[in-house]
Image: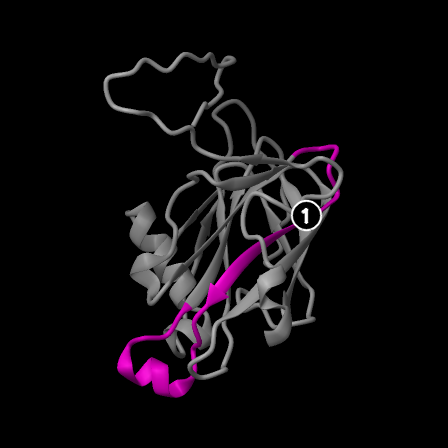
Amino acid sequence: MVVANSSNGSSARRRQLGAAPSVGGDAHMTYYVSVRASDSAPASFKLIASAIRSHLVNGVSVHGEICPGAFIYHHWEHQYLGEERSAKFRITKHGGDGYFVVRHGHNLEEAPLKLAPPYLHMDYANEHAYIEYCNASDAHPDSVASGDEDHVYVLIVGGEHCMSYEIMAEMYAAENNDECVGMGHGAAHATEYTVATEVAPHHFVYGSCANNDWEP
């Protein structure tokens, strides 16, 4: 089965994120689904389409599903003009595995386009975790008009098996903003955060990798 909306993966993901009303206006997209049977036998199938809400609102849980090789974007903003606020994104996983990346940007061109450290990996054993983003600037209409708005993007990358999840944003109160510790902390049940190893010039770094694995 193939779902296509662009011949270019990076631009397609940006356009997919651009369909979210609070980030990219009232954009609409048409997806085309093609099903091809194998050469050896005919096939029967059934198909259902489900929409995954990209905009994260404080206290509202959003359900999503993702499979290997796929990308899903969520975004969060606040409206407190001239203030910095932090957010915690609580994740509940119902099955499968996946990767979570949190970044910020002033526009869609700055949204994350690949899995890069630091990120959170939720494997089969982990059901609950959270990630944080600290000190995001506002997305008040005045800031939007001047091009200075800030969007927090949560990129979800499919793992080895399809994953069903819930994600909910919680904003820290202004007086508790310093409690945010950012990426690399806060996982439940020993969920693994992956960070990049710093490499100094002219010095060897030694390590090893398992088959088909990455070492950042």
Where residue 26 sits in the image (x, y, percent)? 40, 79
Horizontal side, residue 61 vs residue 202: left or right:
right
Q: Quadrant of residue 184?
A: top right
Horizontal side, residue 43 vs residue 216: left or right:
right
Q: Secondary structure at mark 1?
A: strand
The vertical placement of 89 against 127, above or below, is below
The vertical placement of 68 against 8, above or below, is above
Where residue 210 sits in the image (x, y, percent)? 52, 13
| Magenta highlight on residue 121 | no
Q: Would residue 173 be seen by someone viewing this image from the given angle?
A: no
At horizontal 44% and vertical 76% (from top left) the residue drawn is: 138
Q: Quadrant of residue 147?
A: bottom left
At horizontal 44% and vertical 84% (from top left) the residue drawn is: 81
Where residue 34 sits in the image (x, y, percent)? 45, 46
Horizontal side, residue 46 vs residue 27: left or right:
right
At horizontal 49% and vertical 20% (from top left) the residue drawn is: 213
Crowd class of label 1 (few under 14; some 14 to 19; many from 20; radius 10 Å): some
Q: Which residues are magenta?
A: 123-150
Which corner quadrant holds the C terminus? top left
Residue linked to disc 1: 164
Horizontal side, residue 83 vs residue 113: left or right:
right
Q: Would residue 103 be seen by someone viewing this image from the given angle?
A: yes
Where residue 124 sits in the image (x, y, percent)? 71, 33
| Magenta highlight on residue 141 | yes
